[in-house]
Image (cartoon, helix red, strand yellow):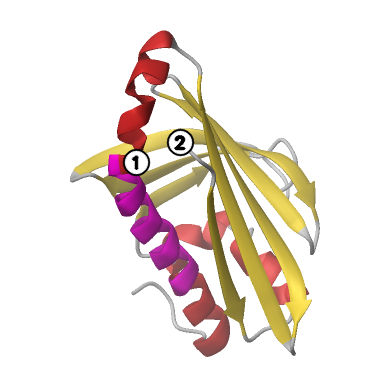
């Protein structure tokens, strides 16, 4: 599946936007699509932070264990996960833009197993649902930053 790219503009400065987007301990209170998020490592969020995220995907509850694999405070971070024979990598970038912040997200998946490679053409069928999910997550965080409102 080709990388998926998303972008949104947030009316908040880049430091605050980065802090809210990378605040895993509060994510399930700010993002409607997340049922539960449990940080598995101690200390502040950064490279090496591991967490379990539970959400409803395709009508079923799904829990994935993820890891922050890169972390550049105020600028970007990457979350990785391996699930069902596929390696996922999602990178968030934060750029000051017109008194606010442009948030760019790139999601890349790479099949790891023969079965995942065989099924990869069907990935486009899931892409629409994944796109809606990512856009809703970003909209929830943008709303939180711009209005202070919590989970929808």
- What range of the chain is rendered magenta? 125-139
- Where residue 24 appears, x then y in whole percent? 57, 54
Residue with the mark numbered 1: 124
Q: Residues within 10 Å of mark 1 (few under 14, many from 20)?
A: few
Q: How far apart are marks 2 and 1 (CA)?
A: 7 Å
Horizontal relation, residue 2 to residue 41: left or right: left
Magenta region includes residue 138: yes
Asked whether 12 or 130 is in front, the reply is: 130
Would you say 84 lies left or right of 52 here?
left
Rendering quarter of residue 97 = bottom right
Residue 111 numbered mark, or none = none
Principal secondary structure, stretch drawn in magenta:
helix
Identity of the residue drawn at 33% across and 22% down: 119
As drawn, 121 above or below 19: above
Q: Does 84 lie within the magenta span?
A: no
Residue at 79% x, 64% y: name it: 74
Q: Which residue is found at the position 53% from the left and 77% from the top? A: 142
Query: What SS does tag 1 mark?
Result: helix
The quadrant in which residue 80 appears is top right
Which residue is at the far top? Answer: 114
Mark 2–mark 1 contact, CB under 8 Å?
yes
The C terminus - image quarter: bottom left
Q: What element carries label 2?
A: loop
Residue 8 vertical placement versus 35 (above, below): below
Name the residue: 70% across, 60% down.
Answer: 93
Percent coordinates x, y for residue 114 in the rendering: 42, 9
Please name the residue that numbered disc 2 is placed on.
1
Q: Position of residue 79 (x, y in %)?
A: 61, 42
Quadrant for residue 5, please give it. Answer: bottom right
């Amino acid at each position: 599946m080709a990388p998926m790219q998303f972008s949104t503009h947030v009316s908040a400065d880049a430091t605050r936007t980065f802090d809210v987007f990378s605040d895993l301990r509060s994510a399930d209170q700010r993002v409607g699509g997340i049922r539960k998020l449990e940080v598995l490592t101690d200390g502040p969020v950064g490279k090496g932070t591991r967490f379990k995220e539970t959400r409803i995907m395709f009508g079923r509850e799904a829990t994935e264990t993820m890891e922050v694999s890169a972390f550049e405070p105020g600028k970007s971070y990457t979350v990785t996960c391996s699930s069902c024979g596929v390696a996922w990598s999602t990178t968030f970038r934060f750029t000051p833009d017109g008194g606010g912040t442009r948030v760019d997200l790139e999601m890349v998946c790479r099949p790891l197993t023969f079965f995942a490679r065989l099924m990869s053409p069907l990935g486009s069928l899931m892409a629409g649902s994944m796109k809606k999910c990512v856009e809703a997550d970003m909209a929830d965080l943008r709303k939180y930053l711009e209005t202070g409102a919590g989970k929808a």
